[in-house]
Amino acid sequence: MEQLSLKERQAELKRDFIIEVAKRLFFEKGYENTSIDEVALTAGFSKSTLYTYVKSKEELFMHIHLEGMRSRYELLSQKMNRKSTGYAKIYAFGEEYYHFYKQNQGYFKLHLYEDYNSLDKSKIELELYDQFDHLLDRIIAIVRDAFELGIQDHSIRGNIDAGYLDKYFAYTLRTILNVAFSPEKTKQIQDVFDEEKFYYQYLDLFMSAIKNN
């Protein structure tokens, strides 16, 4: 029994090492530009050996994306919990969203990829995908709950569907961040581009549109 436990721990350490190598490559080169062969070579394993620890490139993606989501969820929920009104909670979400992804742009790129591409679930361990679905539900819930609280406490307009608001908010914030983090997308802007000003001006516009005056 002790010997089996040791083997399991060794396998876990090797898997974690492979995930870290993949994360570095995905962040540096992009997920689409990194092959599973390159991950195996960089980690010092044959591809067949690598597959004894992870199921696929898609599974590596999910491990790393889930890691980023966990960190983001903890920071977002902590900051939102310090606020009392629904409006203030949503604004706090917007602030932390920028700061987290400003410091972790590799996770942001994976998030964008997951938004617009369908991962093959058959190549990901079911338990891992279930963890992703559960955490995504929790993130959606804290945002939707804040919008619903804002409608109830009258800090947010009452004539808006909270179920739509969380989608508007999440997808537009990511679109704005994608532009802010991509200088080549800002060539038509005449002034010196200020990515933080660009993001926060949008956040303020969105919040002013939903605020109950």
Image (tube, grey):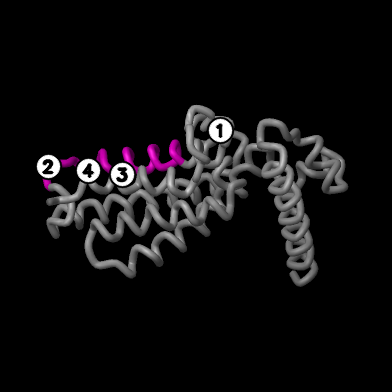
Q: Does residue 117 appear anywhere in the picture?
A: no
Q: Residues within 10 Å of mark 1 (few under 14, many from 20)?
A: some
Q: Secondary structure at mark 3?
A: helix
The amino acid at mark 1 is Leu
Judging depth in this view, the residue of 194 and 162 nearest the camera is 194
**Range of residues picked out in magenta:** 158-176
| Real-space Cα separation, disc 4 to disc 3, in angstroms | 14 Å
Q: Secondary structure at mark 4?
A: helix
Q: Nearer the viewer, mark 1 or mark 3?
A: 3
Tell me which label, 4 or 1, sits earlier in the chain. Answer: 1
Judging depth in this view, the residue of 4 and 93 nearest the camera is 93
Q: Does residue 75 appear anywhere in the picture?
A: yes
| Real-space Cα separation, disc 2 to disc 3, in angstroms | 15 Å
Q: Nearer the viewer, mark 1 or mark 2?
A: 2
- The residue where tag 1 is placed is 119
In the picture shown, does residue 189 fall above or below 25?
Answer: above
Say left or right for 9 vs 117.
right
- The residue where tag 4 is placed is 209
Tell me which label, 4 or 2, sits earlier in the chain. Answer: 2
* Number of marks present in the image shown: 4
Percent x, y of residue 90: 31, 55
- The residue where tag 3 is placed is 166
The amino acid at mark 4 is Ala
Judging depth in this view, the residue of 131 and 82 nearest the camera is 82
| Real-space Cα separation, disc 4 to disc 2, in angstroms | 12 Å
Q: Secondary structure at mark 1?
A: loop
Tell me which label, 4 or 3, sits earlier in the chain. Answer: 3
- The residue where tag 2 is placed is 159
Q: Nearer the viewer, mark 4 or mark 3?
A: 4
| Residue in the image at 33% along x and 43% along y | 169
